[in-house]
Image: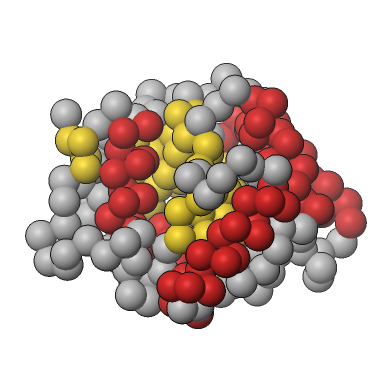
């Protein structure tokens, strides 16, 4: 079976766990601090500019957002963490929802944790990393906004980030860019494989990696 990411549609929002859609498809979860590029990446994967809302004011995304990819899998955008402008109890509620979701028996096959390639992981990122290591779930670190750095700078940042995260090497760090599409086709393949599917390659752009 194969999956065509260009057939991605909005499925719905969940403010509570019991509002999530039926757990009938493999779910790929996206996490990462606000503004790291989650919505942009969903749009790039789907080849659909307006699908996920980019640059909402930080803290506006208070729900788990579900996307249906070609009726084969679900992409979920978790409430971002690190909302400076959101009241503390609200923040607690977001992380509680994320926590509940990640600890539920949802059919999660892959967690994509996003980091801005230019910055070192913060405390939340390190907590997430610890959680991922302990979870036994497959995960992939995605380094966003790769177009902001040269290839040599990307390599140096990868080494640094791997070190900070306590990873032995950079093999689980994938650099992507929505601007020049670096890594997008590779990420589609990684996601498809996690769901036991083959990616239908993009007919237009040659894969850039
Ligand atoms: N240059 C560049 N900017 C990006 C990239 N991805 C996201 N951005 C920008 O980063 C900002 C935050 O992106 P958004 O998708 O809203 O982040 P989210 O809060 O994690 O959903 C927006 O201004 C995007 O245009 C990228 O690959 N390259
Ligand atoms: Mg967003």
Q: Quadrant of residue 24?
A: top left
Report the residue at 45% width, 39% height from top. Answer: 28
Q: Can residue 67 be seen here? A: yes
Residue 78 at x, y percent in the picture: 59, 48
Q: Is residue 77 left or right of residue 160?
A: left
Q: Is residue 94 left or right of residue 114?
A: right
Report the residue at 81% width, 68% height from top. Answer: 84
Residue 95 at x, y percent in the picture: 75, 45
Report the residue at 45% width, 29% height from top. Answer: 109
Q: Give the farthest residue toward the left.
A: 203
- 113 and 12: which one is in front? 113
Residue 144 at x, y percent in the picture: 51, 64
Quarter of the image for the C terminus: give it. bottom left
Give the vertical position of 33 relative to 140 (above or below).
below
Report the residue at 40% width, 47% height from top. Answer: 67
Give the vertical position of 4 relative to 55 (above or below).
above
Q: Quadrant of residue 115?
A: bottom right
- 168 and 12: which one is in front? 168
Residue 203 at x, y percent in the picture: 10, 60
Quarter of the image for the N terminus: give it. top left
- 141 and 104: which one is in front? 141
Q: Is residue 142 left or right of residue 190?
A: right
């Amino acid at each position: 079976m194969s999956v065509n990411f260009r057939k991605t549609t909005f499925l719905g929002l969940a403010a509570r766990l019991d509002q999530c859609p039926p757990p009938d498809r493999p779910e790929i979860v996206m996490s990462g601090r606000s503004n790291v590029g989650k919505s942009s990446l969903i749009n790039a994967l789907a080849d659909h500019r307006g699908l996920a809302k980019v640059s909402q004011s930080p803290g506006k995304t208070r729900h788990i957002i579900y996307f249906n990819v070609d009726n084969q899998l679900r992409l979920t955008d978790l409430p971002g963490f690190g909302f400076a402008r959101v009241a503390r109890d609200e923040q607690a509620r977001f992380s509680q929802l994320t926590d509940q979701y990640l600890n539920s028996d949802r059919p999660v096959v892959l967690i994509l944790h996003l980091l801005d390639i230019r910055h070192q992981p913060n405390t939340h990122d390190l907590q997430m990393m610890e959680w991922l290591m302990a979870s036994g779930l497959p995960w992939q670190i995605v380094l966003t906004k790769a177009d902001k750095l040269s290839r040599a700078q990307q390599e140096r940042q990868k080494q640094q980030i791997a070190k900070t995260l306590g990873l032995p090497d950079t093999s689980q760090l994938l650099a992507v860019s929505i601007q020049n599409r670096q890594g997008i086709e590779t990420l589609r393949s990684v996601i498809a494989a996690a769901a036991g599917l083959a990616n239908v390659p993009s007919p237009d752009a040659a894969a850039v990696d």
